[in-house]
Image (cartoon, rainbow, N blue to C red):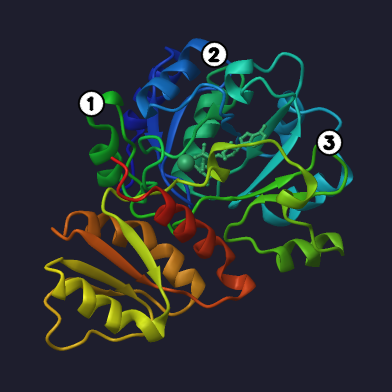
Amino acid sequence: MTPRDADYDRAVDLLKGGELVAFPTETVYGLGADAANPAAVVRIFAAKGRPADHPLIVHVAGHDWVERWAEKVPAAAWELMEAFWPGPLTLILKKQAWVPAAVTGGQDTVGLRVPGHPVALELLRRFAAAGGSGGIAAPSANRFGRISPTTADHVREELGGRVPLVLDGGPCKVGVESTIIDCSRGEPAILRPGHILPAHIEAVLGERPPVADAVGAPRVSGSLEAHYAPLTPMRLVASGRLLDFLNAHRHRGGRCAALCHSQPPQAGMPHAWRMLPADPVGYAHDLYAALRDMDHAGVDMIAVEAIPDDPAWAAVADRLRRAAAGAGKA
Ligand code: TXA
Ligand code: MG
């Protein structure tokens, strides 16, 4: 599972040559390119089929690299880095003038993150040591709008021949994408919920950050309504209505899979039934792999038992809502 020296050497050579390398992070696998090389970054968009005006996160090896990429970094951002890096937190900061527009989607800001995965950090250190910008631009290593990969096999399934090297670091620990905090326009605001919760941010900054919709943030791909989606249509169903929903679907001649966290499998239901952990961290860890399995289960509908309405579930709720909005639109 751990890449060897030769794998890292090849990865650094590919990155320096303007090619793509997929690599593990603690959240999801990323599709990486040299962030200082616009031609390399364009390859990311081509491989994913992603619109070119969507900004990418630049991954760096540590705090030392921040001012290479960002300027006017506010005190609050340094406090968040100190508390959460390496880890599943992305900060949006004012960019340095030289940072390529291909990375930032033409915006005057850049997203930065130090990932908390030993393979990602080793790759970043070796890439930095080989000279250059030290930054690897990487979105999640999936086709645009689809489910983010949490294993190296998922990456191959998504991108196959489009990426010359996939570094295998085993399954991702967190399982959903990083929390994104905009620190570029006054008070920090949450652009995307993730493993790091508003309460964790509040414990560091002394104030709970607002969620960005309320502050008119830029439109970003992770905030599109239809995203993180399976190919099979998917519906969120309240726990109490789940059995009725499944029965009605079956009587219409359909084949429905159930993705649950509290409703145990029911006898006499012929469809795939998957139990996910009943806590938000465990659920997030398993969610994308489960949706991927369901897509291969030969069903025509995925019924997802609605999850608790609680701040600790915000990241899962966000991904499920967007997945349901995008599901079935091949
Ligand atoms: O956990 C993660 O964040 C993973 C791993 C690979 O690091 N990456 C990831 O990248 O989820 P991606 O491209 O799938 O999502 C990045 C999000 C997008 O919603 C993008 O628009 C937003 O970050 N973003 C990046 N730079 C930004 C900027 N300058 N301003 C606003 N949003 C930005
Ligand atoms: Mg993504």
Query: Which residue does the image show at 33% across and 80% down from the upper left?
Result: 242
Closer to the chain start, of discs 3 and 1, is: 3
Is 81 situated left or right of 276 in this image?
right
Position in image of residue 125 (x %, y %): 55, 33
Residue 264 position, x and y percent, is: 28, 86
Please state the total of marks drawn on the protein image. Answer: 3
Q: How far separated are the C-alphas under marks 3 and 1?
A: 39 Å
Judging by the rendered image, the residue that carries numbered circle 2 is: 37
Image side of residue 24 versus residue 258, left or right? right
Q: In screen coordinates, is 190 left or right of 14?
A: right
Upstream in sequence: badge 1 or badge 2 = 2
To which quarter of the image does residue 219 belong? Answer: top right
Name the kind of residue labelled 1 in the image.
Gly
Question: Measured along the vertical axis of the image, is residue 313 above or below residue 151?
Answer: below
Q: Nearer the viewer, residue 218 or 201?
A: 218
Residue nearest the observer in this picture, 329 or 138: 329
Q: Which residue is mark 1?
A: 161
Assign a secondary structure to mark 2: loop
| x and y percentages locating residue 103 in the rendered image | 59, 23
Q: Which mark is residue 107?
A: none
Q: Which residue is mark 3?
A: 73
Q: Which type of secondary structure does the marked residue at label 1 adopt?
A: helix
Q: CA distance from mark 1 to mark 2?
A: 22 Å
